[in-house]
Amino acid sequence: MKLERKVGDYATAAAAAQVTLDGSGAFTQVGLALTNAGPMPLRSTAAEEFLKGRRATDDSIAEAARRAAEAASPTADRRGSVEYKREMARVLAGRALKKAVERAGGR
């Protein structure tokens, strides 16, 4: 998932997720990364660890996205303020996780 001001522009924020679910719909493996949410791309280990063993629900995904955004350390520039970029990291992390769950056969 990527947010950009116009096509071809650098992303304001972006997130990527990879998940594996067990038969009950619980996360067994989780990978979640953010870019343009700090000085370098980051892997959100707090969100990943939170999700492992939990069922893939809207609430668990929302909490993981919140934890991912909390780990971000964006800087303000012409693409947005720190607060805006952190919020976009949260939104995009949630969207990336939901899409990954869908592709893994969940919900």
Image (spheres, helix red, strand yellow):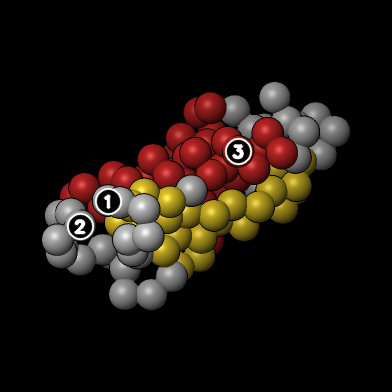
Residue 95 position, x and y percent, is: 49, 39
**In the image: residue 29, left or right of residue 65:** right
Q: Which residue is mark 3?
A: 99
Q: Amino acid at mark 1?
A: Arg
Q: Residues within 10 Å of mark 2 (few under 14, many from 20)?
A: some
Callout 1–callout 2 Cβ contact below 8 Å? yes
Residue farthest toward the front in the current orientation of the protein: 7
**In the image: residue 67, left or right of residue 100:** left
Residue 11 position, x and y percent, is: 35, 59
What is the quadrant of residue 106 in the picture?
top right
Q: Amino acid at mark 2?
A: Arg
CA–CA distance in space, label 3 to label 1: 22 Å
Report the quarter where the C terminus lies. top right
CA–CA distance in space, label 1 to label 2: 7 Å
Q: Which residue is mark 2?
A: 79
State the residue at coordinates (45%, 68%). 42
Q: Earlier in the sequence, mark 3 or mark 2?
A: 2
* Foreground label between 3 and 1: 1
Residue 94 position, x and y percent, is: 48, 40
What is the quadrant of residue 39 in the picture?
bottom left
Q: Which residue is mark 1?
A: 5
Q: Is residue 13 visible?
A: no
State the residue at coordinates (75%, 47%). 20
Q: Amino acid at mark 3?
A: Lys
Please, what secondary structure does the residue beneath circle 3 have? helix
* Foreground label between 1 and 2: 1
Q: Earlier in the sequence, mark 3 or mark 1?
A: 1
